[in-house]
Image (tube, rainbow, N blue to C red):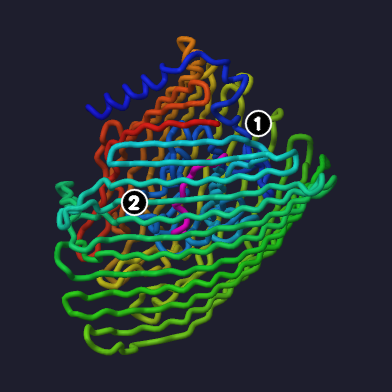
Amino acid sequence: MKRIVLLCSLFAVSSMVFSEVEDTTKIMKLKLDEVLVTGIKQEKISKSPLSASYVGKDFINDNEIKSVKELSSYVPNFFMPDYGSKQTSPVYIRGIGSKINAPSIGFYVDDIPHFEKSAFDIDLADVSSIDVLRGPQGTLYGRNAIGGIINIHTLSPLDYQNTRLKVGYGNYNDFESTVSNYTKLNDRLGFSVMGTYHQNDGYFTNMATGSKADDIKNGASRISLVWKPAQRWTLHISSSLDVSNQGGYPYGIYNPDTKEWAGVNYDSYSMYKRTVISSGISAKYEGRHIIFNSQTSHQYIKDHQGIDQDFTPAAVYYVEQRLRQNMLSQEFTLKSKGSGPYHWIGGLFLFTQKAKNSLEMSYLTKNYSTPKYYDIPTKGLAVYHQSTYDISSTLSGSVGVRYDYEHAENTYEAYKHVVNSDIVKTGDSESKMHFSQLTPKFSLQNSFGQNNLVYASVARGYKAGGFNQTFITDDEKSFKPEYNWNYEVGTKWHFLDNKLYAELCLFYIDWRNQQINKTIPGVGNIQQNAGHSDSKGVEFTLQSNPVKGLNIQLNYGYTYARFLEYKKSDTEDYSHKMLPMVPRNTFALNADYSMYKVLNVIDRLTFSGSLVGVGKIYWNEDNAVSQPFYMTLNMKVMATVGRLTCEVWSKNITDTDYISYYFVSGGKFAQKGKPFTIGTSIIFNI
């Protein structure tokens, strides 16, 4: 309580010491206007026949959202559990997701694809908007888009110019700083530079070592150049670097019957180190009748995980895993432009990915380890096309199809290393796999006025198979592709002179050969295929601007996802059980209110609050343990005087006690959710 009073006092003093200045609404803007970024592949999502959410810069700032994980529940039926480390970043949309190996959700930053989910948990500094597209997006996006797409757009120096300094501090010794510059040299040339650093001592203490288990240090930078060499051409060059060094995996023994958590208590420090470099060059030509876009992307990932696999004070198991990935992709798209009844888009996508993994399990009580090495190069190509025809002035239909081909190889070597002895080779193999698939999509929409519509769509989703990094039998070396059909109907409406917006969608997903994670104590995680599953639910969004300065938004999602047929073994039949890691409900109620020229001193004063809920969540296929529905309360206050903005924010104000992850591996373990946190920051716009 003393910390809260002190922070609030500092905030109040810093807001009052400045003398009156000109109205900042005339000379500068605290926030960017919510400009919807229209991607090369889709029109404005508010006018497209699909269920999607647009998250703007204002919303990200008002709710102190610093990573994609913190977007959970703010978007209907979007869940990204916050546990483990940055490496453990599974994403679930409508129940579709993947806990290990390749993700089931496409992830793009400025049109640069991220194929590894270990690169999903990135800093959201200076992000202009995020689009979340729900349901299979294979027709236009293809790889790993069986559940949906996340598109992140950063600020462009041609649209936004500013030099900005931000410094923040909170409890748990949480410190962050950001420096950025966006300069427009002329109407055709602009550049930007951004750097950010964040550290936190950690929320959970390891009783065995007496130190924090989940501390983190993370730094990121990004440079960008936008150039228009000619009237119809735009060239965008960008590169980003993200480096993190963190403790992780604050797992402790958990008793599901009594709901008692014993706390973190293991002998070896568990950690995760990651370096991600992403670079892209896009060239766009916008003619009178066509739009052409070329996107060349490269991503390099280097990471190192070390984890006390038994999670006890005894020295039993320790696992080290390393990844080196180089991914190069090229995409060409050609799109019609004009006001005629026929619209189309087509494209070609090529990629090559080289991934080298190593996994070493140390059996500490037996004084030996089992290092394993994997070399998994993957190549793929895809061609796609989508046609839309305006049947009448209000009715239009779309038909799309994509053909994907992938070829993957796996060179595997296994060894046994006894302490003070030679390394003995215990196995090797070379495998090849290839996959091909057609993914069609059909949609029909009817518009009412300029902004209202109803739609229906049917889409095929597909995700390629792959190789497991751990296995016991030859059958477990690889897993098969998975498929689904997504059926949905929805509507989008504007009311009361655009002061009220409502969106409603109903969906049903028929899912075959679902890729499921299997945990084997002392071995690791294995991906295998289940038989038949389905998922059905509803998504609802309501946005209102009832009076000047007040914005209210309600987002709700309901997902009922279950196994229809899944016999794991002769003694394990999970048919008709609920899918694990899928929340039944996601809920978010947000409100922000801004006042101007308060006491003729504060140019702008904004109060923001959000009530966020998620659950019920079953953690395993047997549905034996679950997390009931819970809610957290978050608040933020921002005051701007001249070029200075002061903020005070808090999350989980009620200190809600909940489980963020549960698993069984030689014992029953869980990780607690983050406790009450509070902090303040100062932003100076030069």
| Dot 2 or dot 1, earlier in sequence | 2
Q: What residue sits 34% from the left and 66% below the top?
A: 518
Residue 585, by quadrant, is: top left
Image side of residue 374 versus residue 115, left or right: left
Task: Please tell me the numbered disc located at residue 452.
Answer: 1
Which of 597/77 is in front?
A: 597
What x and y, as percent, mark residue 158?
68, 39
How far apart marks 2 and 1 lie (CA) works out to 46 Å
Q: In this view, does 613 lie to the left or right of 312?
A: right
Residue 124 magenta-drawn? yes
Query: What residue type is disc 1 on?
Result: Asn
Q: Residues within 10 Å of mark 1 (few under 14, many from 20)?
A: some
The magenta stretch spans which residues? 117-129
Q: Is mark 1 on a helix, strand or loop?
A: strand
Placement of 405 over or under 331, stated as above or below: below
- Quarter of the image where one finds residue 1: top left
Name the mark on residue 216. 2
Looking at the rendered image, the quarter that the C terminus falls into is top right
Q: Nearer the viewer, mark 2 or mark 1?
A: 2
